[in-house]
Amino acid sequence: MGATYLGEGRCRFRVWAPYADTVALHIVAPEDRIVPLNRAPRGYYEAVVSTVPPGSRYFYLLDGKKERPDPASRYQPEGVHGPSAVVDLTRQPWPDERWPGHPQEELIFYELHVGTFTPEGTFQAIIPYLPELAALGITAVELMPVAQFPGSRNWGYDGVYPFAVQNTYGGPHALRQFVAACHQQGLSVFLDVVYNHLGPEGNYLGDFGPYFTDRYQTPWGRAINFDGPGSDEVRRFFIENALYWVTEFAVDGLRLDAVHAIFDQSARHFLEELAASVRQAAAKRGRRVYLIAESDLNNARLIRPLVVGGYGLDAQWSDDFHHALHALLTGEANGYYRDFGQVEHLAKAFRCGFVYTGEYSAYRERRHGGATELCAPKQFVVFAQNHDQVGNRALGERLSTLVSFPALKLAAGVVLLSPFLPLIFMGEEYGETAPFQYFTSHTAPELAAAVVKGRRAEFARFGWAAVPDPQDEATFRRSRLHREQLQEDQPRALFAFYRELIRLRRTLPPLTNPSWEQMAVTAFEHERVLLVRRWNGATEVALIFSFNPEPQTVTLPLPGGPWEKLLDAAAATWLGPGAPTPVSFWSEGAASLPLSAYACVVLGQVREE
């Protein structure tokens, strides 16, 4: 679909517009002319047009009355209401055909927002920082959505042109250069895509065909029509979009936003069809492309194999892991945090990926979730922070402003030493203190007012009253990173601590083995301590996480024999107060160990075989 440049000034235009009796192409630059399109089966219109060089601007003219941008526009240089532009990506060499990517268990995600990562807010401006991320140990950069949204400031979830790369970020050529630069640094690239709704401003798809349905409701707008009349072509539109990122930009994976709001009662769910299509396209190119879902249903069907009725996605985010960790660190018990707060909750997350696998949820006032049999730890993405959990607080406070420095190190240890795929939210690695707040730049005043009203209603359940104005440019500016903080002692020490945790994760045999079968997890509720034992052959590590704000001595069940301390967050190296846990000791099946406040200790043992 869309405008496909064929070379020598020739371009094929194809649009699905079953609502229109006639469709014409209105080229507005470099010369103004109208070209009728030919009707094709199933509501398509198409034509190959000459003298259409790259950069040409155009609209579609529906029934001689409505002039609309291309639903599959590759570029909107003048914004969501302006003309679409013809793009020729073939002129840009693609240097990394042999890029191997990373095995799934080696993925360590770094989520970033292009507009706030640097003062410039462009793909190009991020490239100089890629070596730093690679040196930290990151293996995958995950971009928040880049599909064209209204104005210049937005999280990206109000996108209305799924194929068009945001003009203020640099457009499609800049994204391609960014992906190539990441691959040259050994970094995979994941792109956040939104297939559950489109934003409200500049959303003209409904003028072309039945892209939307009133049978279902989403919190953000009209639901996409994935199972009603005309849905075959709607499904094709979004599957083509996924393949576009895979084939034209060589992205290594897609993060699928809020799939619980993708409603489909078909015998073959859209997500199953999407997974199969992406996997087939990647295989033809000798690549492995991952699909990772975000869902609040705790439904393992998303990631189970097709042969047992699953959808065959590769992984999904675990909000439960975050909530369990956050509640222990902060003591917050409002909103959905009321379902968490015990060490055993975090222990359950370690054992199962989710905390709620069918138990009663007080927050939801019903049972929630399902079992995770036939799943593996590498199929769960975990985090202490992400754009949602920070930005969807009323003031967008990061963990660095809510808890102490020792607690920040503890949070890093819990995430990075888990058997799951860890995700770091931009700036977290050095304790960024700037908030990440919700920002928009809608041009319609009534829409902007509705956004503020909606967010205030959402936050009422948490008892958060003050909500920054998303339309105020100051809200956006406050959300930019201040990477100069890395010159200060504490941020520099935290960055080094993250790097050491990642090194241990990648070098200690038990930590390179993400297996539930070779892991034992014990919660000590009274002491507020979590003990995680992981082993691989004769090598074992014991991870001790204390959520007690005071130093204490705890007796822990550890296999008999000598133990050596491999890391202690309380050490002076990490600007700690001093590490009370001994460097080495002998266990007789249990050991009494002094622990610092918010302790994060890694012990190692090699048994005789």
Image: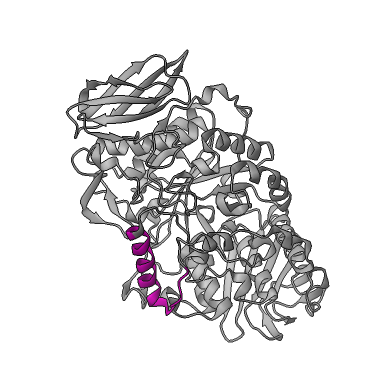
Query: Magenta-highlighted stretch: main secondary structure?
Result: helix
Residue 439 rendering spot, x and y as whole percentages: 48, 59
Residue 221 rendering spot, x and y as whole percentages: 30, 55
Q: Which residues are magenta?
A: 446-468
Kindly tell me whether residue 34 is visible in this rendering.
yes
How many numbered discs?
Answer: 0
Magenta-colored stretch includes residue 452: yes
Residue 281 rendering spot, x and y as whole percentages: 45, 30
Left or right of 136 on screen, residue 214: left
Residue at (40% x, 21% y) in the render: 31
Residue at (63% x, 52% y) in the render: 119
Nearest the viewer among 46 and 556 is 46
Nearest the viewer among 427 and 598 is 427
Residue 194 rendering spot, x and y as whole percentages: 40, 48
> Taking 335 as reference, is 472 above or below it?
above
Nearest the viewer among 468 and 240 is 468
Magenta-colored stretch includes residue 22: no
> Taking 382 as reference, is 187 above or below it?
above
> Taking 443 as reference, is 395 above or below it?
below
